[in-house]
Amino acid sequence: MFPVSALKLFPSFKIITTAMLLCFFTDVAYGQVAAGKKDTTSFPVDSTKFLAFNEDGFSFFAHQTYPLQHPLDGFQIFRPRLMGANGGQAYINYSFPEIQPVGFRRSVNPYSLFGFSPLRKRFYAGDRPYTAIDFYVSQGKDQQVRVIHAHPLGKDANIAVGFTRVRSEGFYQRQNTSNTSINLNGWYLTKNRRYRLIGDAIWTGIANAENGGLIDDDDFEVTQQPNRRLIPISLSSAQTKQRERNLWIKQSVSFGPVVKTVVDKDDSTKTKKLHFPTWAISHTFKLTDQDWTYIDLDPTSGFYATIYNDTTKTRDSTHLWKVENALWVELLERTKDNQMRFLHGQVGVRHEFGEIKNDTIKNAFDNFMLSVRIVNPPSEKHKYNFNANGDYIFQGTNAGDYQAQVRFASFLGKNILVIPEVQISGQQAEFLYQHFSGNHFRWQNDFVQVRQERVSLGLNFLKLFTLRAVGFHTSMPLYFDSTGLPVQFNGDITGVQFVAGFEIHKKNFHTWANVRYTEIPDNQALRVSKIQAIGSIYYDGFVFKKALRLQAGIDYFFRTGYFVNGWMPSTAQFYSQSDKKTTDYVYLDPWVSIKIKPVRVFVKADHVNAGLFGRKYYETLHQPQPDFVLRIGISWVFND
């Protein structure tokens, strides 16, 4: 059993002991850590036929693909621990604020982890159809389903459709979620490599009840009330709705001489011309349409201190539409002799325009920006590569905003990979920080530009141990204070973070762990847990004459106590507070999973230790995490 009582007796020894026991966290989301782990057995047999690539991997030549693996390792980790108190709710970021792309936006969306995202596009390749179905069910009437089907249209085109759905009632009153996301994408490349087309369309709808948290935390922490639905809550008839539609299309025309005529391998009496284009002109088009709505049929419940308009019903809404066009000139990755270039990249001019409405506020916006990207790919001659990109708004609503990033990767010897990275950014406050008009909040602000710098150095040893150090500095950061109002911190915040991880495999027993240690000044502008750790210890083997693969183990997630953020339903944003600090806590999740050819199944006792170490498992103010929950997951991949 985890020695919590011993740690409490020795506070100065607590952090070091915990880190040694649990090892540690990575700076990607909980589910992403497991998703990146590899299976020791290839699956399916023809898994090399199931390939995918991202937006930058689409090429006039060979696409930069990666195999779609479906390992048993990490299959039981299907949902971040920090996704609110119920599946489909807002996600809590434990790391430093991410540097965002430049351009106009309403705010960073805490629901962006759910469903398909325009920032995480995935396209499919292969000579046969690909279908994957994932289904998860838990206590609390929690159901999640995800379906992906990709279909090749010959060798030079593919179309894919995706569907994901969360439907859950949760364990407390007014905690139900109903979220749906649909994705349609595809690509086409002419045989002569002169024209390429790629596109992605996403529709996402979110409808989540809001309970405002528990009225009195003692009803959960002290009172022995097994029925969580009897605990009084702050909001009895509130709901958040979001709808987002995104369309992205990119077309490219390449230029370059015909350099070779060869015999057609399918018909020796015919010849064909091979083109090795050296540069291209591309046009990208983006359309974004977003709605945010907050509804409360009882505004006088006492949750909000102010009512501006209507005491019978709150209906705050914001609508944003945005159109972006960009024209790019690309120097392609290969020369006319079909040799890889030392450097390639693109430069383009982008223009975005649109309108945002919020109650009595109606603002039009437009921005002209310059974008540059340079890539140095690895080759047989050198074992290093780097890429650099930058954006600068030279005219418009957000004139003067910029962001740039340089990333380098190189091997030291054969087994050590070194990855230094530098990021800088200067951006005006997002619309939500500047303007808002609703039934409970109203503000008009004129905040100055926020500047951020981030420097990191990563080391990868034999792919079994990783270490990354990050230095972070932000000037005049923005946050929401304990009253739910936007505030700009008058000064700078500097912090450091160390991220490390390891894997150990010894016959049938395996363990992996990741830890993150963060050191920042104690202030309200940025609140994170000092140490977070995630890991797993498990057995892996075959039974029934190797017809079935079996894994059994226990996952853990630990974080030190800190002042957790509160959640403001009317603005759908987390806010800082200094009244309640959580204690150190560890979640323990024993599980068993099996794999039979294309089918994977797991059974997981999620948070099996609930209540054993005290009832202090909050990740959001006044909103406890679920108690013990039995979860079952099934995944099936079809070969045709």
Image (spheres, helix red, strand yellow):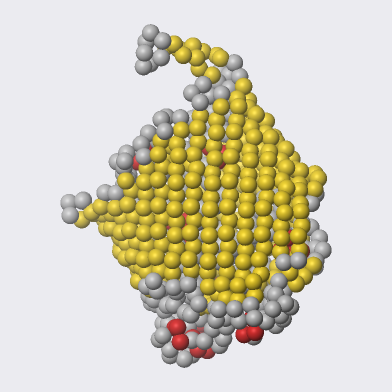
> What residue is rendered at 36% in x and 13% in y?
267
Q: Where is residue 403 drawn, in percent x and y?
A: 71, 48
Q: Is residue 72 left or right of residue 203?
A: left
Q: Is residue 542 left or right of residue 266?
A: left
Q: Where is residue 539 drawn, in percent x and y?
A: 30, 60
Q: Where is residue 338 drawn, in percent x and y?
A: 54, 21
> What residue is rendered at 76% in x and 43% in y?
368
> What residue is rendered at 50% in x and 36% in y?
187
- Residue furthest out toward the left: 545
**Could you say which is closer to the camera, residue 380 or residue 179?**
179
Compared with 577, 535 (above or below) is: above
The C terminus: image quadrant: top left
Does residue 619 appear in this view?
no
Does residue 350 appear in this view?
yes
**Could you say which is closer to the camera, residue 292 or residue 413?**
292
Compared with 450, 585 (above or below) is: below
Q: Where is residue 172 drawn, in percent x and y?
A: 47, 79
> What residue is rendered at 34% in x and 55% in y?
635
Compared with 513, 385 (above or below) is: above
- Residue furthest out toward the bottom: 223
Q: Quadrant of residue 159?
A: top left
**Could you say which is closer to the camera, residue 476 or residue 342?**
476
Compared with 118, 113 (above or below) is: below
The N terminus: image quadrant: bottom left
Q: Is residue 308 left or right of residue 462?
A: right
Q: Quadrant of residue 233?
A: bottom right
